[in-house]
Structures are given as structure tokens and as C-alpha cells.
Amino acid sequence: MKKQANKNRRSQEFNVGYKIMVKLLPRDLKFLRGRDSRLLQKYERPLTIVKKIGKMAYKVDPPHWWSRQLYPVFHVRRQGLKPKAAGKRVAEAILNDRVITASRKRHQEYLVKWQGYMEEENTWERAADLSA
């Protein structure tokens, strides 16, 4: 049973200073009076992790407009999308390369290890995107 239950679970660990998107629940948005919660964004902009609390919770640096009623500690499951535009990433190392053929064109791609990110965050990037 434990094996079946763990199939759908994801183990995530983040370091202090890592940026995450936090999923906001309707109860978190009750301080924004006069706005329909269906029209508000689902995820808060990339927030910086300040402290790890226990095994599964993280304290984030809240934006200035958050009220004191919203507690800035979130469980790992509330971590949403990975921030793509959280700032400029710096390549730490190139781990591998490959050639991709798409629409009769060949593209060179590199497996990039990003500085400040975990191994699971390594991505394949086109050579043209890295030189820019």
C-alpha cells in the first residue's frame, strides 16, 4: 500500500534563496475585498525562500502588500509552477550535448546545470539561446 501511495507523491527540497511560485487559495485572498477570486491570479510571483521549517514547510519573503493575516509559511504541495522569468539564470556547467533534427533543420542543444538550482532543474537549451 505504501508503494502505491508513494507513486503520486513528489519529494521536493529547496534551498534557502531559491525562488518558488506559491499557489494562493481563496482563503488567502480574503483580504482583497471587492475583487472576485475567480479573476485573481492562481500563483503568486516568484517568492524567495527565507527559512526551511521542518521537513515539508518553507517560510518565504512576502510581498509588501500582503496583510499580516496571511501567514508566509507554505507546505511543499502549495509550491506551484517553476518560475521561468524569475530573473536571469547563470549557467554553472554544461553537462552534455545532443543534436536535434526538427523540420529538416539540425539544432545543437546542451544540458545546462544552473547556478543555485538543484540537479532536477537541469535543462536542455539551444546553442543559440545560450550565446544570447
Image: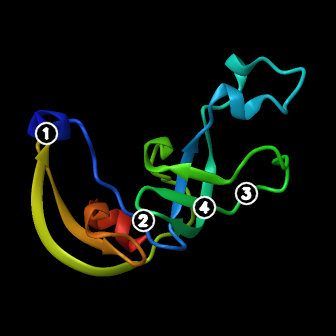
Give the quarter of the figure containing the C terminus.
Answer: bottom left
Q: Which numbered disc, 2 or 1, marks the residue closer to the eye?
A: 1
Taking 121 as reference, is 37 left or right? right
Which residue is at a point 46% across and 63% down the rendered structure image? 54
Q: Decide which of tag 2 and tag 1 comes sooner along the chain.
A: 1
| Identity of the residue furthest to the front in this view | 1
Q: Secondary structure at mark 4?
A: strand
Give the mark, 2 or 3, whose residue is nearer the N terminus. Answer: 2
**Amino acid on which the number 2 mark rests in the picture:** Phe
| Mark 1 Cα-neighbour bin, 10 Å: few <14, some 14–19, many ≥20 | few
Q: Is residue 13 left or right of residue 93?
A: right
Task: Say which mark, if any, is on residue 61.
Answer: none
Q: CA distance from mark 2 to mark 3?
A: 17 Å
Residue position for label 4: 59
Tell me: residue 53, above or below residue 3: below
Q: Residue flagged by tag 4: what amino acid is it? A: Lys
Location of residue 95 in the rendering, given as x and y in whole percent from the top left corner? 17, 76
Identify residue for label 1.
Answer: 2
Q: Is residue 62 left or right of residue 113?
A: right
Can you say which quadrant of the picture contains the N terminus? top left
Instruction: Give the secondary structure at mark 3.
Output: loop
Residue in the picture at 40% in, 78% down: 115
Query: Tag on residue 62?
Result: 3
Q: Residues within 10 Å of mark 4 (few under 14, many from 20)?
A: some
**Which residue is labeled 2 in the image?**
14
Mark 1 vs mark 3, foreground winner is 1
